[in-house]
Amino acid sequence: MSIAHGPHTLAIPGPSIMPERVLRAMHRPAPNIYTGPIVDLTHSLIPDLKRVARTEGNATIYIGNGHAAWEAGLANTHARGDLVLVPRTGSFADGWAAVAEGLGLRVEFLDFGNRDPMDPAAIGERLRADTNHEIRSVLCVHVDTSSSVRSNLLAIRREIDAAGHPALLHADCIASMGCDVFEMDAWGVDVAITGSQKGLMTPPGVCFVFYSAKADRARDRSDLATSYWDWRPRTNPAVYFRYFNGTGPTHHLYGLREALDMIVREEGVEAVWARHALLAQALWAAFEAWEAPGGLELNVRDPAHRSHAVTAVRLPKRGTALREWCEMRFGVTLGIGIGMADPGTPAWDGFFRVGHMGHVSGHAMMGTLAAIDAGLKALAVPHGAGALEAASRVLSKA
């Protein structure tokens, strides 16, 4: 017998739960893609996207996932053979580096492991040693979705400036934008990328690249930007179809408009950040109460460096069993571990992840934690007591 019948909860770190009103906005016939309401709607998206990214710079929309955004950002700012520095805190830095290498760029890693944030001082030291300014960009994953490590981009920008280095600062905000505090202009980020399917609460399929005037000057020497990836024709185009270099992702645009209404015009970006911070603190309180020898352990030990959107959890040899129990018996889907396995173990058996991004409420958070609590008991996983009480105390103080 299963009690998973009824509404299912998706607690993976993207795609996140899609609000019903976003899905309803998308459920319509195809529009005229040359003139009329879809043109005005698209024009209205750009200012609100920039409000979410906290920038007065440029915003572009691409049809594609986060990997597409990686390629777009790199192609517009580099020439073949350029050197990029990749401070690594998880598997998504590896993926970004692979895209860079595929474009013919040289990649140098600073590996900080899978549990700790980037060390800004170490980045500054490397840049000071680069007296010939070979390094063209520093590629920083703000929140690595695999490890749930969140790094301090402002401190990294200060180190770049203190080193007197001209490198661009790129930020992968796919897991963080619309969830964690991110201030593109105030933090001196030159290129920021994100996708539609996490904090922006829209189905996967579109991605966004924000860029500064300094980044656009790098476009002058780039030899990688094909007619499709080139961001200049897509920025403030005189002809509508140039937004997308062809047919636009029409139904995603309808959904995105509804999602941005919710984020920017109704709840407000700062309130969205505060909600995510509070829900994350409740989740951490529960997991800290559960921690026990032989049981689960939060991957990131310092709360100051934990994501407010995703939490990676270590559970030796039992992560898969817990995930399967929660999904099949309770109707709650948790995320698999990605690239976090210890040597000699299956790809993700020793880890799982909880996504708490986008359209998430206190009710949803407590339901997910209750499912995990029941699973730990059913599987006889060693764990401490009082987790749900700890989480509810955090939320009760809101």
Image: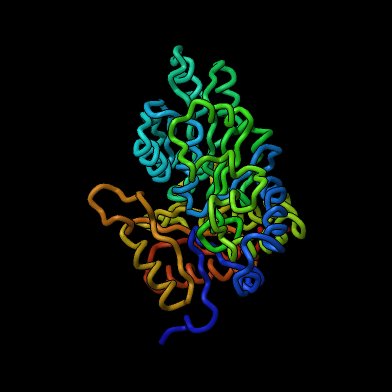
Q: Residue furthest right?
A: 266
Residue sitting at x 36%, y 29%: 106
Give the percent coordinates (x, y) of residue 396. 71, 62
Q: Residue furthest bottom?
A: 1
Q: How many marks?
A: 0
Give the percent coordinates (x, y) of residue 231. 56, 40
Q: Residue furthest left?
A: 344
Q: Is residue 121 above or below residue 392?
A: above
Q: Is residue 188 left or right of residue 173?
A: right
Give the percent coordinates (x, y) of residue 315. 38, 57
Q: Residue 99 or 116: which is nearer the viewer?
A: 99
- Whether residue 81 can be seen here: yes
Q: Residue 14 or 28: which is nearer the viewer?
A: 28
Q: Locate the N terminus by quadrant.
A: bottom left
Give the percent coordinates (x, y) of residue 388. 57, 66
Q: Is residue 94 above or below residue 219?
A: below
- Whether residue 255 can be seen here: no
Residue sitting at x 59%, y 49%: 242
Residue sitting at x 59%, y 20%: 161
Q: Residue 106 or 147: which is nearer the viewer?
A: 106
Q: How is the image coloured?
A: rainbow
Q: Is residue 256 left or right of residue 290?
A: right
Residue 251, by quadrant, is: bottom right
Q: Is residue 277 above or below residue 172?
A: below
Q: Is residue 148 left or right of residue 191?
A: left
Q: Locate the C terminus by quadrant.
A: bottom right
